[in-house]
Amino acid sequence: MSSETKKQWNRGWEISADKREWFREKSIDSAQRKKQALSKTKSFSNEKIRKPKQDNSALMPTLSANGIDSVSLFSGCGGLDLGFERCGYRHLLSVDILDICGDTIQTNRPNWFVKSGQINGNVQNIAWKNLDLNRKNDFLIVHGGPPCQPFSTSGRQLGKSDERDMVPEFFRCVTDLKPDAFCMENVPALGNKKFSPYLDQFLKIKPKYYVRIFKMFAPLFGVPQRRERLFIVGFRDKNVFSRFKVPVPTHNISNFVNMSKTLKKYVKFYKGMDQSSLPHTYGMREAIGLNLSYEDNLSPTFRSGFTGPRNSTSILNGASSQKVFKNMGIWGNGIAPTISDALNFPTPDGTVRLATQDCAVVQGFPQDWQFKGAVYQVIGQIGNSVAPPVAYQVARSIKLALHQ
């Protein structure tokens, strides 16, 4: 990173004395409430500990083997990997630069081939042409979500000048492995005019791929979170490409669309569809097993706990997200390791504190998916991940195109 880029990057973390004092007061207040919680002897029976109503496994029915091998880059905690696996793809490899992400995937799938860490998990170090992937199927797909920070509107949008930009590495893998299809996920901003010339150069790789770029909105597929993501799907065969269809909604969000301009634009996806035949997406409270004594709503988009100079246990960006949580009676300033810990931790306004399990449910992970690491690492993995039910629907559409 150049000295000028470093200056630009560091300026993003300059804060005023008042803001620094605000952080200090919040830290002191949190420590006092944590001490109060630890001093309690109150325990909670299984009956009193809330259980989620949301069944994310039901959003991703396990399909039989489909004859397609898959390679996963920037795998994180396995959001894309899980969605593709449940759609019948045969997993060959997961790669991530963070050891903790490798630990999470290996814990859940001990038989998978996983490369993680600063050396083994750095895609820049992998010679794809020389890698033995133990392929067994006729078809191969490469999928992954390169780091989004270089393009995100919540960052400095340095693009290719950001040392975290790994889009070139994703397409180097595609060029070397020459898969039948690829699927890349990122923030919607990567598809904006600002980055279109940059992205276009990679979409002209050889061998030629026929490409479809589209956005997916998680609530349309049963995930109770306002999470929008860009997908870029490419096929080597033009006939296969012509058969690919962008996934259509599986759920009805008509009870939420009037609450936000962001949601209204997605009504167009329902054109020609019988909305009444689709199940409603749960609001966040109902999804995690809370009563409806407060208004229910979709969760704001979770941020990553890895973001920024502090190991934060907050999952929200901005005052508007805090307001949405408060209106739902949910505490927005920190996550507890377990539901029991959350119940024991007093909030100053009587709202409900969330646990890491709640965050996983709202992101679309099945209840049996285990996350490794400290709280900030767990919510960091969750906030960075693709919602598995969304990945599942994209995987299903790719499978139908290849096999039709």
Image (tube, grey):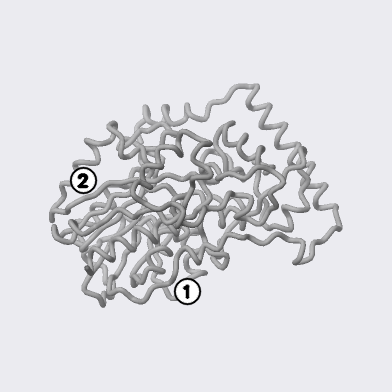
Seen at 47% across and 51% down, the residue is 252
- What's under tag 1, amino acid-wise? Pro
Q: Earlier in the sequence, mark 2 or mark 1?
A: 1
- The local secondary structure at tag 1 comes to loop
Of residues 291 and 241, which is closer to you in this image? 291
Of residues 353 and 24, which is closer to you in this image? 353
Task: Give the mark count.
Answer: 2
Location of the N terminus (image quadrant) = top left
Question: Residue beneath label 2, please?
Answer: 202
Q: Residue 361: which quarter of the image?
A: bottom right
294 left or right, relative to 234: right
For the residues labelled 2 and 1, the Cα–Cα distance comes to: 34 Å
What percent of the width, then of the height, locates residue 310?
58, 40
What percent of the width, then of the height, locates residue 24?
69, 32
Question: Residue beneath label 1, please?
Answer: 110
**Crowd class of label 2 (few under 14; some 14 to 19; many from 20; radius 10 Å):** some
Seen at 70% across and 52% down, the residue is 291
Of residues 373 and 238, which is closer to you in this image? 238
